[in-house]
C-alpha cells in the first residue's frame, strides 16, 4: 500500500536517525494568496484556503541508534526499490467505453507511483475517457526516471513527448478542457493554470497552480457540461475535498494498528516481488516506522482516536452529497469529482481499511459503479 511514499519516508527516517538523536520533519504549507487569471474571457479564482498537501507521511521521529537507521535505509531503499518497473507499461482503452467518443490522437506518458492516490486519480480519468497511455513507474528513492524534470513530484504527464503537465488536478483539468473544447492546444490551455512558487513554514520551496479545479471552456460548452445550477460548483468543491481532506485519511487508516501496518507492508512486498532479504526489512521495519508515523498524522489532522470513524463519516458525507436519486455526482455519468474520490479510495483496495469501509458505510454501490465505468483497467 502506497509503496512509493513509504519508500521515500523510510529512507528519510533512516538518514535522520543516523544524523541526529532527535529530529523533526514537517510539511506545513503557508497560506496561498487568492489570485485570479483571465482566460477564455473570464477570471477564475483558486478559491483555496491553502496549498494542497501531498499525502504526508513524514512526522517527528525521536530516539537514536545507527543500527536502526541502517535498517530503515535498507528497508526503504533496497526493499521498496524492487517495486519499480523500469519498462513502460501500455494501457489500452477497451473498445467499449461509457465515456463519450473522443477521437484524440494524444500520445500520453504517465510518470507515477502506482499506489499514490494522486496518480490513481489521473489513471481513473484516463481510463474512464478511454485514453491510451504509457506508464513509467518511478523509483521512489532515487527518482532517476524523472531526473530530467525540475518538478520532482508525481504524477507527471508528458503529452506528445513535448508538453509536461504537473499536479494531478492540473492534469485532469487541462485534459478535460482539451477534450471538451478542442479549440486550443494543450500548451495554450496550460497557460490558464499558472505555476506559483512560495515557501512554507519550514522555508522549503513549494509549488502550487492557479485555477487547477476549473475546466476552462466557453459558456456554451459549460452549459452543456454543467447543466444543473450548482453542478460546476459542486464538482469543484468535492475535487478540492478529495485533495485536502480525504487523502489525509488514508495513511492513518491503513497503518492504524501494528497488525494493519504489517499487513499493509506484506501487501507491498507481495506486489513488489521482493527477495527474502529485501522483503524482510521492508515488511518489518517499514511497518514499525509507518505505524509510529500514522499516530503523528492522526494528531496533525485532528482525527478521532478511532480513525476509522473519520473515514466512515467522510465517505458517507460523499454518498449523501450525491443523493439517492443519482448514480454519480455527475448524475448518469461520473464527473471529475467522482473520478477523484474513486481514485483516492482505490489505493486502499486489498487492505483491512478498505474492507471495513465497504462494510460499514454506504459507499459500496457507488464505488462499484465507478469501478465499472473506468473499465477496471488500472
Image: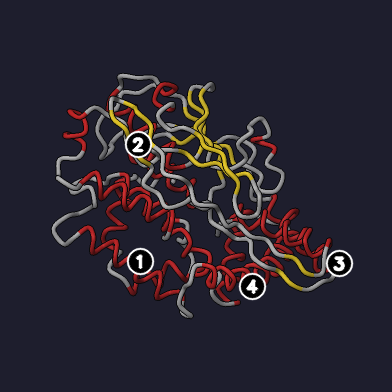
Crowd class of label 2 (few under 14; some 14 to 19; many from 20; radius 10 Å): some
Mark 3 Cα-neighbour bin, 10 Å: few <14, some 14–19, many ≥20: some
Q: Residue at label 2? A: 94
Q: Return the disc, 1 or 2, that comes first in the chain's sequence.
A: 2
The residue lying at 55 percent from left, 41 percent from top is 207
Left or right: 228 as drawn, with respect to 7: left
Q: Which of the marked residues, 4 or 1, is nearer the chain's N terminus?
A: 4
* Marking on residue 88: none
Q: Nearer the viewer, mark 3 or mark 2?
A: 3
Q: Position of residue 143 (x, y in %)?
A: 67, 41
**Residue under the point 24% across and 27% down:** 218
Q: Tell me the SS state at disc 4.
A: helix
- Label disc, if present, on residue 66 of the rendered structure: 3
Mark whose residue sits in front, 1 or 2: 1
Judging by the rendered image, the residue that carries numbered circle 1 is 314
Residue 98 location, quadrant: top left
The residue pinned by badge 4 equals: 292
Q: CA distance from mark 4 to mark 1?
A: 23 Å
Q: Please name which of the two marks, 2 or 4, marks the residue nearer to the observer.
A: 4
Residue drawn at the location 13% of the way across and 58% of the way down = 325
**Relative to 202, is 297 on the left or the right?**
left
Amino acid at each position: 500500500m502506497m509503496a512509493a511514499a513509504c519508500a521515500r519516508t523510510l529512507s528519510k527516517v533512516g538518514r535522520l536517525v543516523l544524523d541526529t538523536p532527535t529530529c523533526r520533519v514537517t510539511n506545513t504549507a503557508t497560506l496561498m494568496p487568492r489570485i485570479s487569471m483571465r482566460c477564455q474571457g473570464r477570471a477564475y479564482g483558486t478559491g483555496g484556503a491553502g496549498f494542497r498537501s501531498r499525502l504526508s507521511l513524514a512526522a517527528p521521529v525521536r530516539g537514536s541508534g545507527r543500527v536502526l537507521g541502517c535498517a530503515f535505509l535498507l528497508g526503504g531503499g533496497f526493499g521498496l526499490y524492487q517495486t519499480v518497473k523500469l519498462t513502460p507499461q501500455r494501457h489500452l482503452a477497451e473498445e467499449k467505453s461509457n465515456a463519450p467518443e473522443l477521437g484524440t490522437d494524444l500520445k500520453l506518458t504517465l510518470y507515477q507511483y502506482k499506489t499514490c492516490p494522486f496518480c490513481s486519480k489521473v489513471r481513473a480519468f484516463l481510463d474512464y475517457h478511454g485514453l491510451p497511455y504509457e506508464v513509467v513507474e518511478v523509483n521512489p528513492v532515487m527518482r532517476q526516471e524523472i531526473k530530467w524534470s525540475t518538478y520532482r513530484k508525481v504524477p507527471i504527464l508528458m503529452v506528445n513527448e513535448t508538453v509536461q503537465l504537473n499536479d494531478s488536478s492540473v492534469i485532469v483539468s487541462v485534459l478535460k478542457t482539451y477534450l471538451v473544447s478542442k479549440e486550443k492546444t494543450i500548451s495554450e490551455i496550460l497557460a490558464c493554470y499558472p505555476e506559483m512558487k512560495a515557501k512554507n513554514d519550514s522555508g522549503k520551496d513549494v509549488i502550487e497552480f492557479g485555477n487547477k479545479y476549473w475546466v476552462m471552456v466557453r459558456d456554451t460548452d459549460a452549459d452543456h457540461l454543467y447543466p444543473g445550477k450548482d453542478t460546476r460548483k459542486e464538482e469543484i468543491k468535492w475535487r478540492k475535498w478529495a485533495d485536502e481532506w480525504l487523502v489525509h485519511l488514508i495513511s492513518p487508516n491503513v497503518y492504524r494498528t501494528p497488525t494493519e501496518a504489517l499487513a499493509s507492508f506484506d501487501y507491498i512486498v507481495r506486489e513488489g516481488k521482493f527477495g527474502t532479504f529485501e522483503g524482510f526489512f521492508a515488511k518489518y521495519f517499514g511497518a514499525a516506522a509507518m505505524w509510529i508515523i500514522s499516530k503523528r498524522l492522526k494528531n496533525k489532522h485532528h482525527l478521532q482516536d478511532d480513525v476509522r470513524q473519520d473515514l466512515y463519516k467522510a465517505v458517507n458525507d460523499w454518498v449523501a452529497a450525491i443523493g439517492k436519486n443519482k448514480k454519480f455526482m455527475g448524475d448518469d455519468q461520473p464527473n471529475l469529482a467522482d473520478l477523484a474520490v474513486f481514485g483516492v479510495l482505490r489505493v486502499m483496495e486489498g487492505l483491512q481499511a478498505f474492507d471495513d469501509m465497504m462494510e460499514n458505510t454506504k459507499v459500496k454501490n457507488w464505488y462499484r459503479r465507478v469501478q465499472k465505468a473506468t473499465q477496471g483497467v488500472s
